[in-house]
Image: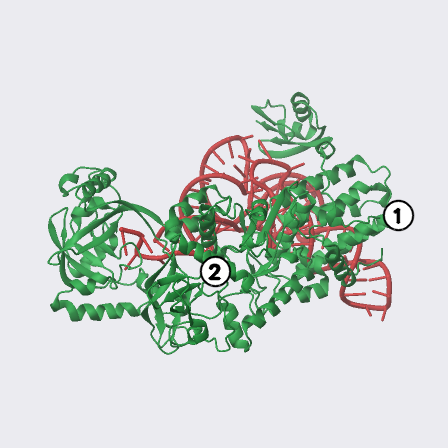
Chain colours: A green, B red
Amino acid sequence: MDERYDFRAADPKWQEQWERDQIYRAVEDRSRSEFYLLEMFPYPSGDGLSVGHLRNYVPCDVMGRYKRMRGYNVLHPMGWDAFGLPAENDALLKGFHPKELVPRYAANYRRQLKMVGCAYDWSREINSSTPEYYRWTQWFFLLLYRRGLAYRATGAQWWCEKCRTILANEQVVDGGCWRHPDTPVTKKDLEQWYFKITDYAERLLKDLDDVDWPEPIKLMQRNWIGRSQGAELGFAVVGHPGREVRFFTTRPDTVFGVSFMVLAPEHPLVAEITAPAQRAAVEAYVAEARRRTEIERLSTVKEKTGVFTGAYAHNSFSQREVPIWAADYVLMSYGTGAIMGAPGEDQRDFEFARKYGIEIPRVTMPADGSAPPLDSAYSPYGTTVNSGFLNGLPTEEAIEAACRWAEEKKLGRATLNYRMRDWLISRQRYWGAPIPIIYCRRGCGIVPVPEDDLPVVLPDLKQYQPSGTGRSPLASLPEFVNTACPRCGGPAERETDTLDGFACSSWYFLRFASPHYDRAPFERAAADYWLPVDLYVGGAEHAVMHLLYARMWTKVMFDAGLINFAEPFPRLRNQGMLWAADGQKMSKSRGNVVTPDAMVEKYGADALRLWEVFMGPFDEPTNWNEDGVVGTARFLNRVWAVMRRYAQAGCPSGKCGAETTRRAHKTLRVVTGHIERMRYNTALAALMEQLNYLAARKPEELDRFTIESYVLLLAPMAPHMTEEIWRALGHRKSVHLQSWPDFDPELARDEMITIVVQVNGKVRDRLQAPAESDEQTIRAMALKSAAVGRYLAGREPKNIIYVPQKLVSIVL
RNA sequence: GGGGGAGUGACUGAGCGGUUUAAAGUGCCCGACUUAAAAUCGGGUGGUACCUGCUGUCACAGGUCCCAUGGGUUCGAAUCCCAUCUCCCCCGCCA
């Protein structure tokens, strides 16, 4: 061993060796238990990886290496989420085609990940923007379509007249276009494809109970799904036979207190029922409302506005006629887009009624008989009053009674409502998987592309900027659009919208099981063996969308009998965000990005890896600080020095004391426990502590087990240096193919223990006693202690508390 | 407005009922090596809040207090409970 460890030589040397030996190749082997470890599908950005990204990849790599040493058949793959807006926008900006840029960027990511020693099975690399991949994304679209889960509907989209394009929700800022805030955006009705994720709402909610995920993430999903129990009812519109206002309410017990109805401005009924006298006012109001973003409309600080339509609804409970208003505090996209106004019990309705001088009846009284507040609604449960047959009932019972009555009279029924909406998957953009649908002009209507004709290849367009017509750039390509109807052979047109990028990431975890299989999205046997994912790791920012979509697709596949599990990620963990040194997000524009390349060049891959795991708990956010890498680099130097000293002494294996053996086993126990719990920072701290111990010994006071177990424990975190040391210790096979050392609880046990003696809660003495000493002996020792005697001063203890192996507490 | 997470030494962070000024690292100080610096190696590193001891200062010894703040539970609390303050994240007129 050289005096100094030369990481510049060792890092690439071992990386090449591992690659030659293919030691990270995952091969199905039914005789071994598998461990499928997966990080969330990254989009390979042109900026490359920063040290922030490694906060995820390095700890996962440690886990993969650890599990491999524990004897698991580890699948740890990597691939690229390459379709979508970021790639397309970047390509437009750089003036290259995304088809060229994506592989270039991916190659850079791959290079960087290899550079820091991450052990992926690169033979399984996938790229969602290749026809070999998106062929199957399209196949899944057809699967959903066949199962009635993909449908077309008209939806209002944000439209910027100046850009002449559709905008995503997040591109609308304060009612204007993000590019030029002075241009107001409007809503444009477009026919779009949706996936019926709401059909799965209940299961997506329920199955959350059985999954090992961080609680906050589960909670976010629950909130997002937003299940609420109530009733859907309908009131007839006076003077419009056959027309009724259908609405959802969680408080059917307050239906007698309804003094008005509200429709969302976009509600189709608004135009139909508006009285001639009100028409001008209503139309102006609706036009104004359509300009505003939902965020703005939902803002609680804003005063509620609305307009009377001039029409009335018949409250079939109270037999009263109540005015129908249009107001933008009611959202078309939630429930039925209409509500009953129960101002006595709902604060929003209360504010609205008060502003427009609408009557505010009281139908719920506090159960304790006190008077409800006058300046606000009384929304808690209580006792129902002024409500016909519901009078005197507690709210819970009144809800049930109202539902029963509604059902008997065929006015409505008890029902569930979900906040979650269907998943809009049409994108009028170029860089995505074409939706495999054909519109027959002769009368077959919507015809799915036959499976055998997949993939519908994304044509190689030069001009792929958003077209300005609200249609995808693909629409400008006649040779793509014009086709023959697969059913009747007649003239037909292709769908020109592309699939939302989230579609690609909704099944990629299955593709890794058999990434090159070309007869189906995945090979059943491979999927059965590897899946579900044993540990899924990614940022909390995907708490809702990606995880919800992937869960839904998995359930669809399960229902279709394609797989034997209904949850793709039984165990999920989130890494903490790594902020830049200045506490801000690492970004090129802020100029605070630190690249792994610079760190590896300066300190070596292992020092960087160590700092990535050591800087804080894996799941907590922290700031980058380069001083830390100095520390871990120093630590590695000391490891090298200790090992070198041992090797140069001829690897003595004589009599190392019991204390040394005990420390070795204790370290083994502690480090293993920390890694299992993903507390890599404390695992490394324990290794540092042990190194401090080893460094203080002479080589003759150590033995092979003590030294080699240490190297093995460090191997997942510092794969390059430990490999170098392992070979220097005389081994021919890679350290990463070794078994995790066995821990012997007998040898780890202390012979002597320290017993603390407290008097009135203060530590007054510490006793050394053999570990097996019994209570009697310990108590006697404690009372005999000179230090204790001083405090006792001849008094009799009132109480003595004995905690086995730990302390004696004397109370005076 | 609702929900979630977190507040420990100069800093990053361990500890989550009992050995605790509190792991590990950084920083800082001293020393070695060196012409010197860097690197490396060795050692050290809470307050200077309160009380007591020596004649006063420095220093020293012993004790008390201090893990956001204030209460509480307990023989015993950084660790458990309550309230307050601060920071971060998510959702948001969801009927």
* Residue A322 visible in the shown view: yes
- Per the rendering, the mark at residue A649 is 1
In space, the residues marked 1 and 2 are separated at their CA atoms by 64 Å
* Residue at horizontal 45 percent and vertical 42 percent from the top: A209
- Per the rendering, the mark at residue A483 is none
Q: Are marks 1 and 2 on the same chain?
A: yes
Q: Chain of mark 1?
A: A
In front of the other: A427 or A335? A427
- Residue A37 in percent (x, y) is at 60, 50
In front of the other: B18 or A427? A427
> Is residue A307 found left or right of A5 in the rendered image?
left
The quarter of the picture where the N terminus of chain A appears is: bottom right
> Is residue A220 found left or right of A255 in the rendered image?
right
**Outermost residue, top side:** A776
**Outermost residue, front side:** A489
Q: Disc 1 or disc 2, which is closer to the eye?
A: 2
Q: Which image quadrant is residue A745 in?
A: top right
Q: Chain of mark 2?
A: A
Tag 2: amino acid: Gln
Q: Earlier in the sequence, mark 1 or mark 2?
A: 2
Residue that label 2 marks = A138
Q: Secondary structure at mark 1?
A: loop
